[in-house]
């Protein structure tokens, strides 16, 4: 019997309120609702999350590895763009 | 039957339902064609086993004979089990399993919602936890029944056949006996007539969405609550109890 693979989805989990969603991994599912269920069952079994996003992998527009030089290198010698000249106030976490 | 005996009997039924259905789901572990559904099923099985443990522990305390959760789960015979006949039915194909879960969990969720408000604190606490788990199970399994029913011609026909075949086991869920009546009267337990009405509405809505026909009223099989089981339970618990029977008190 030929087996047709379900589409791939990328899973993003927010571990607690106030933080942003982070990429957790990917799962296969036949539709969006199933993708959400599978993400929940695969990635939040140990209370890892308070919110889940899933998105079809095919819908993600990614940068081209071949263009890494043009894309990212111009930023490397511009250290003045980094906020390293500020002192972080006490009590600020997750910055 | 005094109220403590009746409470014990009621809790034991909850325990047996959870264990027997949990064991059926355990039989499906490592049999799923998709990794993600495999995980979902194993999670569901564990939810049921976890609930069974809480119910059995409490039932043992109520009984007061020093029986532990394991004694109750593994050292009773077939005719001492009080689970619904529906739950001991073999897994069959995927559609059979899903139909069984949707029919039962549509009932169990309503039962738990009522138990959360019963006057026995322990039962209410266990129900509060179980309710969240079952709400998710039902959501997941309902979606599957809709996908199957409203899917291909073959999946539709097979899902319909599954619902039709299991329907005759659903009458028992709502037929109150002395244990149910005492629990309702003395512990503010569920009103099975009201649950039946709500169940019919909910199940009708799911079947409609799944483009499946609701089976006609028919003769219903019962007996599970009194320990009169179908031929499937014996084989099932023989496998489940094997280790405890052959190596009593074995632990790991």
Image (cartoon, rainbow, N blue to C red):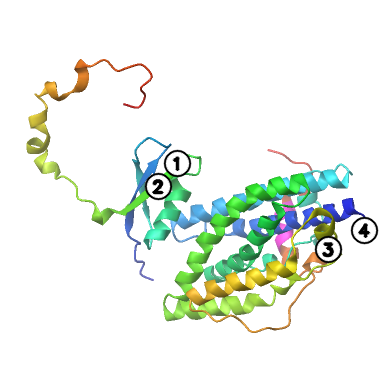
The tag earlier along the polypeptide, 3 or 4, is 4
Estimate the spatial distance between the alpha carbons at disc 3 and disc 4, rounded to whole Å: 11 Å
Say whether mark 3 and mark 1 are on the same chain.
no
Helix, strand or loop at mark 2: strand
> Tags 2 and 1 in contact by the CB under 8 Å rule?
yes
> Mark 3 — on which chain does it sit?
B
Tell me where residue B169 appears, x and y as whole percent. Answer: 70, 73
**Residue A2 in which image quadrant:** bottom left
Estimate the spatial distance between the alpha carbons at disc 2 and disc 1, rounded to whole Å: 7 Å
Specify few, some or many for label 2: CA neighbours under 10 Å numbering under 14, 14-19, or 20 or more: many
> Mark 1 — on which chain does it sit?
A
Magenta residue span? B236-242
The residue beneath circle 1 is A49
Farthest right residue in view? B1
The residue beneath circle 4 is B1
Tell me where residue B76 appears, x and y as whole percent. Answer: 82, 55
Name the residue at 62% across, 62% down: B105
The residue beneath circle 3 is B181
């Amino acid at each position: 019997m030929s087996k047709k693979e379900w589409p791939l989805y990328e899973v993003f989990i927010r571990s607690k309120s106030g933080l942003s969603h982070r990429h957790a991994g990917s799962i296969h599912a036949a539709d969006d609702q199933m993708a959400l269920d599978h993400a929940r069952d695969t990635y939040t079994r140990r209370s890892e999350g308070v919110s889940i996003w899933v998105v079809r992998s095919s819908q993600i527009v990614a940068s081209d590895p071949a263009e890494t030089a043009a894309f990212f290198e111009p930023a490397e010698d511009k250290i003045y763009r980094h906020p390293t000249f500020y002192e972080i106030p006490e009590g600020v976490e997750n910055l | 039957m005094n109220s403590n005996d009746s409470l014990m009997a009621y809790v034991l039924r909850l325990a047996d339902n959870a264990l027997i259905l949990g064991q059926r789901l355990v039989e499906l572990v490592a049999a799923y064609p998709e990794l993600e559904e495999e995980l979902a099923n194993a999670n569901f099985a564990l939810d049921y086993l976890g609930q069974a443990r809480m119910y059995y522990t409490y039932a043992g305390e109520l009984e007061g004979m020093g029986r532990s959760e394991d004694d109750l789960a593994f050292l009773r015979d077939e005719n001492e089990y009080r689970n619904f006949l529906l739950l001991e039915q073999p897994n069959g194909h995927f559609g059979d399993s899903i139909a069984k879960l949707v029919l039962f969990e549509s009932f169990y969720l309503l039962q738990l919602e009522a138990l959360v408000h019963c006057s026995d604190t322990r039962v209410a606490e266990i129900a509060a936890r179980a309710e969240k788990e079952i709400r998710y199970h039902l959501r997941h399994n309902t979606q599957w029944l809709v996908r199957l029913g409203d899917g291909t011609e073959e999946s539709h026909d097979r899902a319909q056949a599954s619902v039709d075949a299991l329907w005759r086991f659903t009458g028992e869920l709502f037929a109150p006996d002395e244990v149910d009546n005492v629990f309702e009267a003395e512990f503010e337990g569920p009103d099975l007539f009201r649950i039946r009405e709500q169940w019919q509405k909910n199940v009708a809505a799911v079947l409609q969405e799944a483009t499946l026909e609701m089976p006609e009223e028919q003769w219903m099989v019962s007996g599970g609550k009194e320990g009169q089981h179908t031929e499937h339970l014996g084989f099932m618990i023989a496998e489940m109890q094997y280790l405890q029977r052959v190596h009593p008190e074995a632990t790991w």
